Structure formats: C-alpha cells, structure tokens
Amino acid sequence: RKKNPTPANAQKLPGPKGLPVIGSVHELPGKCSWMKFHEWGQQYGPIYQVNLAGSNHVWISSDKIAHDLLSKRSGIYSDRPFIPALEQDNRTSGQYLPLMSRNEKWTRQRKFAKQIMDNSQKASFFNYPEVESVRLLFELMADPSRYNHHLESFIARVTSRLAWGTSAPSEELKQRARELLIGVSPTGALGNKLPFIMSLPEKLAAAKAWESRRSRTERKFFETMLEEVAQGLEKAPTPLTPGVSVKQSWTSMFLKKRGSWGFSSDLEGAFAVGMHGIAGALTIAAPMQSFCLALCHYPQYQPILHEEIDRVLGDRMPTYEDMPDMPVLRAFIRETLRWRPPVPTGIPHESTQDDVYEGYFIPKGSVMHPLEWSISRDPEMFPEPDAWNPLRWLNSNFPTYQEPLAKYPTITSYSQFGYGRRTCQGMGVTEADLFVGIGSIAWLFSMETVDESIDMSTRSATPDEIHTPTSDDDCAERFDLDALDAIQRKLMPLSNDSGVDLAYDSHGANSDLPTPPMTPAEEKTMRFPSGLRTLKLVKKVEHQRTRSWATTPPETPAVELPSLDLPVPSTIPTTGSAEPIKSADGSYDTDPTMNFSTLLIAKPLPFKFRMQIRNPERAEVVTKQWTELKMKGEFEDARVYWKGGNAGDAQHGWGEVFS
Ligand code: HEM
C-alpha cells in the first residue's frame, strides 16, 4: 500500500477489511474456499480486493470485467504470481508453462504447445480417446464401485498416450499431477502457507524435503520418458518400420524437429511435454465425475441425451467425428462445466503495472482471480444459475443459445479456460476427451440415485437423507450388473498352441439360472485380422429368460422428447433452482454435489448411485472390442518406475499426498 498509494483520481476497490498482517486469511474455510469469494462478490460487487497475508488479491465475478482487464489490457495482466512452496522459481525455471512469467521460455514453449496441439487435433488425437473409452466402459461394467478411479484412469491413459505414445505411465502421471497440485495450491503444501520454511535446511523442514524429492522424481520421470521415446524412434524411424511400432505422441513430434523449437536443452522439451501431460491428467476427469452427479440429480434430461445417442450412433460408440451431429451431448458437457467448474477459483494472473479501472485503483503486483464459480453463475447470462439445465444451450429462448447447432454449444473459448494471453492450451483435447468419454458412458449406461425417494433436483432433501460418501470403495452401490462380473470371470484366457483363446458368455446376467447346453452351431469362431490369434466367441442362442440388467432406461418423469429438428422445444421441464445446501457450520458437506476435494481442482468425491446397462447388445460390443484391443496389446498395464515399487527410495518415488 505504501509503495502504491491510491492516485487522486481513483478510489480503493471495496472488500473485507481483515486483520493487521494476516488480512482475511482467517475467514477462509478449509473447503470450498471459492464459495467464500463468491459470497464476498455478492456483498462487495463484481470486482473487489482482499488482503491475504500481505498480498493484494483482486477477485472478479463478471465475464465482462475479466475480459476488460485480462484480455483487453493483457499487456499488464499476463504475469503469474510467485509460488513459494516449489523448489525452483516457477516464474523463471522453464519447467511449468502455466506458471511461468511472460518471458522467452514462456513464448517459445507456448508456440511449441500450439503446434503439438494443432497437429494432434488434426489427427483426431490419434483416436486415443476412442480406444481408451472401450477400456473405460469395460472397467465400469466390471467394477462400477470404483467409477471415480476408472474415470481418472481414462483421462490419464489418453493423456499419457498423447504425451509419450503409451498408456503405461498413466498411474505415475496421476501421481505426478497430484503432487504438483499440492505444491501449487494455496491450501496444499505448507510452504505456501508459511513460505519461510522453504529457506530452512531440509532436515528441519519436512515439507521442503518432500518438495525436493517430488521435484527430483518428476525430472527423472520426464527424462526417462523422453529417452524411451527417442530410443523407439531410433529403432523405428518411420511408423511403418517392420516389426517395430512407435506410437505418435507429442514427444515424437518434439524429437522429430528437435533443433527447431529453440529450447535450451532436451530437458526443456521433456518438461514442455510433461507439463501438458500433468495439465491434462486430472483436470478433465473432474467434469466426467460431475456429469454422473448431474445425471442422477436431474434425471428428467437423461432421455433427451439417450434419444440423440440412439438416433445418431445406434449400436456403435461415439467418435470425435460425431461432434457436429450431437449438440445435445455437447450441451450436457457444456452445462456440466458451467455447473461445477473444474477450476472454480480460476488460475491467477499478476499485474505488472499500476492501473485504474472504472475509477478503481489496482496496484501493481495484484493477484488477479477470474472467479469461475461466480462468472458461470451470472444470472443475466444463466437464468436459474444453480440448476443444471443443459437445455439452456439448446433452447432459443435462453440468452446462451447460439446458432448453428452443428457448432454450438462448444466448450472452446469458454471462460473456464481463462483469459487473454494465458488461455488454456488444452481446450481441444479436453473437448475430445469429454465428448468421447461422456458420450460412451451415456451410450452404454443410464444412471439414477440409489434412493428414489430423494429428489435432489429440488434440493429438498434433509442432510440425513443424503448419501455421504467416505471412500472410493464405499461409493457406488453395485448396480444390477453382477452379470458383468460373470463376463469378466469368463474372459479368463484358455491357452492353446495357436495363441490365446478367450471365451465369454453373452448371457452372464443370471448366473443363478441354469445355463442351457450349447450346440456346436451356437459356437462361432472369429479370427483376428493379424491371423495370429484366435478368439473363440462362445455365443449362445437367445433364451426366454429375464436378465437382471436393465434393457430399458430407468423410469423418469414424463418429458417431451425433442424432435429431430432442433432446437429442443421449450416445454421440457426445468427444475432445481435452489442454492447448494449450506450446513450450520458454513460448510457445504451436506450437499453431495458440493462434496469436492480441497485442492485447486474441484474433484467431486465418490457418491452412491446406480448405473444400469441400457442395452445388453451394447455390453457385448464393448466386451468384444475390449477383447480384440487387449489381444492386440493396446491396453498396457500401468508401470512402476521406481526401484522397490511406487514408494521408491530416498531419492525418487511417490510422496505422501492428500486430496
Ligand atoms: C477441464 C479441463 C481444463 C480446464 C478447466 C483448464 C483450465 C485452465 C485455466 C483456467 C488456465 C489458466 C488460463 C488463464 O490464466 O487465463 C489454463 C491454462 C493452461 N492449460 Fe488448461 N485446463 C484444462 C485442461 C487442460 C489440458 C488437457 C491441457 C493440456 C493438455 C491444458 C494445458 C494448459 C496450459 C499449458 C495452460 C497454461 C497457458 C499459459 O499460461 O500460457 N489444460 N487451463
């Protein structure tokens, strides 16, 4: 304040007064801190400032103001704040593009990022989302109770393939992302709350030692991955080299034009790729998890999505190329991102010059936060902002409606991905992953709350009635799919001399019913294109018996389905306008849709719900495709990179994490 006295022609921004030294730190809740910033926004207006332990933080709850400052005046609002808990200075180290100052390294890495993103997008992300969505559906069928884990694995596997051409590092990548997230979150590493500990010797500061090991492990991992791809490329200089296959990846793109990116070393390239891996590893899983919440709590919209899926896709799974034909699916995705923003606080910019906006003074060095939670809830743009209503993107009566529906709704350029020169580089990948991933889930499954007496869409349930999750294992109620366990059991390999024979029973549903005998005519043998391996598909004839899995979607309130001519008619009911439930202590724990983790990414915690297979033939399609891809070696298991297991040794390995 002394350095930046308010000029005579301007006034101070409004905001909470706070205490000497610590400012308003003590007023922030441990969880859902963005709700406090949202509340302050309602009290002080769409732009206000807060002193947090001596730093001036400016919070913006309006898209227009965020654009005015962060985009139109990007010359002075495009820096990043210093993060004390990291070993290397985030602004200059060249390790993490999203956290760098606007310097030479940032410029060249951003240029590199644009090229690798554009090139992979042109190649439809090498169909990695499509291949991995088969594995995702198979895993969801086999073990639905770990749905949160499977969704994260799907994203981490696609991202690993994009980064290095293999899904083997997916578990390591998730861990790298978790650890970095702790390192950068204001509510994460201790060094961010008490910066002075980072200047103590490691022996005296466990948090510093943790960070030092994290940083070493990350570097070693990125170096290892770069080396492996480089070795693969030496052996197989072209994708068609006989006997060797190197899958396309961002790393192979880097290596093929190694000298032309202007990087100071290969390590800079390894970080430029690895950082994109980390940026994609967990962020995209969050909206997939929120999508499950939304479908369960707003069941009236589910038939609309299923109608589009069945009409456009029929018995095949979605691909990236289906995007223009599926505005309803895109609307569900867009609305999910709006309703539960994965990065609710936004990623802060820092100002490099004093400025005056609308008569208010913004001192140099202010940390500028576009508060996504509030921006996505602007009632002018989003009537009934707390309701999850995908039709706001499809119904011409809503202010968010845009033509043509072949293109809109889209998540590209959405405020969720930031502003000005620092906008997110991963919008294209995010859109592809969400479209294929969420589309595949809705193609195969319907979802509903476990207890139908609870109608969350009106938010009328009392805290006691709401299922509070405790862990991944305790989460989703086993849906009526013990059948799929049976399928998995029957997928046990039966070896013979010619290769691997796999048998599965398409009638695994009712294992309690006697299995009818098979005639030879009922057995079909399928040969893989390679001709090397034989899949013996044991297909039994249809029998008059009831399956325990659902062949029809669960009952939902009557809705008028959209005609083939979109926009969707406005007669479809919309409900659920109430605010998230807040408990007496000020937390939001009683509302499962607000049960997020505490770090920078708002990841919904597991909750109980029921998934049902909509059509058993589709389950068979998935099982067959999974089997084929598995036998082609597409589904690599996650690999351990450290001596003695993930825990590793004193030098490298997984650090302790919390979420
Ligand atoms: C749901 C998914 C995602 C969300 C919500 C998201 C959100 C964001 C936000 C808010 C920013 C900061 C923008 C700003 O400062 O104005 C950002 C930056 C960035 N994101 Fe994403 N992101 C997502 C996925 C991804 C993915 C998949 C990648 C890469 C594969 C990625 C790469 C980046 C990079 C490199 C930046 C830094 C840009 C810069 O500082 O110059 N993001 N993202």
Image (tube, rainbow, N blue to C red):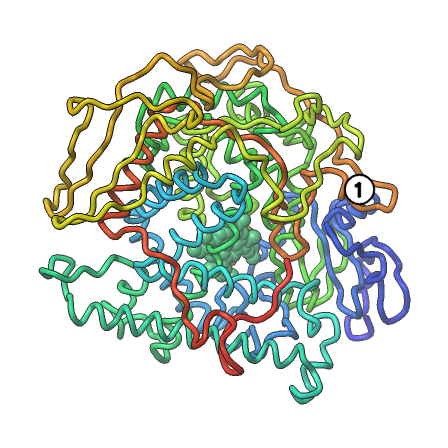
In the figure, 162 relative to 260: above or below? above
- The residue under the point 51% across, 63% down is 175
What quarter of the picture does the C terminus occupy? bottom right
In the figure, 307 relative to 121: above or below? above
> Mark 1 falls on what kind of element?
helix
In this view, the residue in front, 557 or 251, is 557
Q: Would residue 493 appear left or right of 88 to someone viewing this image?
A: left
In this view, the residue in front, 426 or 589, is 589
Q: Which residue is mark 1?
A: 42
In this rendering, does residue 420 appear at all? no
Point out residue 326 in the picture as x, y percentages from the top left corner.
40, 27
Q: Quadrant of residue 336?
A: top right
- The kind of residue tagged 1 is Gln
Point out residue 654 in the picture as x, y percentages from the top left corner.
53, 70
Q: Quadrant of residue 572?
A: top right
What quarter of the picture does the N terminus occupy? bottom right
**How many numbered discs sit on the rendered protein?**
1
In this view, the residue in front, 488 or 516, is 516
> Badge 1: few (under 14), some or many (20 or more) residues near its Cα, within 10 Å?
few
In this view, the residue in front, 355 or 28, is 28
Q: Quadrant of residue 238?
A: bottom left
In the figure, 362 relative to 54: above or below? above
In this rendering, does residue 411 appear at all? yes
Point out residue 523 in the picture as x, y percentages from the top left corner.
19, 27
- The residue under the point 38% across, 20% down is 310
Q: Is mark 1 within 8 Å of ligand 1?
A: no
Point out residue 288 in the picture as x, y percentages from the top left corner.
51, 41
